[in-house]
Image (cartoon, rainbow, N blue to C red):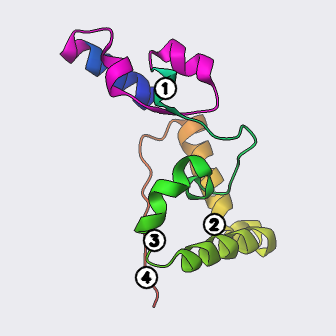
């Protein structure tokens, strides 16, 4: 929401039109009242079920469909989701990747760290 609010303020400042948000923004939300309050026309709202969850944003219907064409192999992507779920259930905390993610959230949220480095690697 911080990014959305920043974009909203920038748009209003540059376009000098209160209708700019309604005309230029869309929302992915289950909360039509909040979308309308933000200034987005609910006709420009992509809704989804309020019970939707997922391990990563890619697995959520609100984000997944536009991303699917980016996957070289959708079955490979699903296998990766399954592998990380299995890893989380079976790996000790000290070497558990999702737990490392939680530590990052704590480090930035609780201790105010300004940056986080994500360093991908390929071991093939």
Q: Position of residue 79 (x, y in %)?
A: 63, 78
Please tell me whether residue 26 is drawn above or below residue 51 in the rendered image. Answer: above
| N-terminal-most mark, 3 or 1 | 1
Tell me the residue at 72%/74% (across/down).
87
Q: Residues within 10 Å of mark 4 (few under 14, many from 20)?
A: few
Left or right, 84 with reference to 34: right
Please tell me whether residue 54 is drawn above or below residue 11 in the rendered image. Answer: below
Q: Position of residue 8 (x, y in %)?
A: 36, 21
Q: Residues within 10 Å of mark 2 (few under 14, many from 20)?
A: some
- Which residue of the protein is positioned furthest toward the right in this rendering? 90
Whether 24 is among the magenta residues is yes
Residue of label 2: 97
Do residues under tags 1 and 2 come within 8 Å of each other at their CB atoms?
no
Mark 3: which secondary structure? Answer: loop
- The mark lying in front, picked from 3 and 4, is 3
Left or right, 27 with reference to 13: right
Q: CA distance from mark 3 to mark 2?
A: 22 Å
Q: Residues within 10 Å of mark 1 (few under 14, many from 20)?
A: few
- The mark lying in front, picked from 1 and 2, is 1
| N-terminal-most mark, 3 or 4 | 3
Tell me the residue at 48%/64% (across/down).
68
| Residue range corresponding to the magenta coloring | 13-40
Residue of label 4: 122
Mark 4: which secondary structure? Answer: loop
Q: Any mark on residue 43, and which?
A: 1
Mark 1: which secondary structure? Answer: helix
- The mark lying in front, picked from 4 and 1, is 1
- The mark lying in front, picked from 3 and 2, is 3
Left or right, 35 with reference to 99: left
């Amino acid at each position: 929401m911080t990014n959305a609010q920043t974009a909203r303020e920038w748009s209003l400042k540059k376009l000098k039109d209160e209708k700019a948000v309604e005309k230029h923004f869309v929302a992915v939300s289950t909360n039509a009242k909040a979308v309308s309050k933000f200034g987005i026309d609910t006709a420009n709202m992509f809704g989804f079920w309020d019970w939707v969850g997922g391990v990563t944003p890619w697995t959520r219907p609100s984000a997944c469909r536009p991303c699917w064409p980016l996957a070289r192999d959708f079955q490979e992507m699903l296998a990766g989701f399954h592998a990380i779920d299995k890893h989380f259930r079976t790996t000790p905390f000290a070497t558990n990747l999702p737990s490392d993610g939680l530590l990052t959230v704590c480090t930035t949220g609780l201790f105010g760290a300004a940056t986080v480095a994500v360093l991908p690697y390929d071991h093939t």
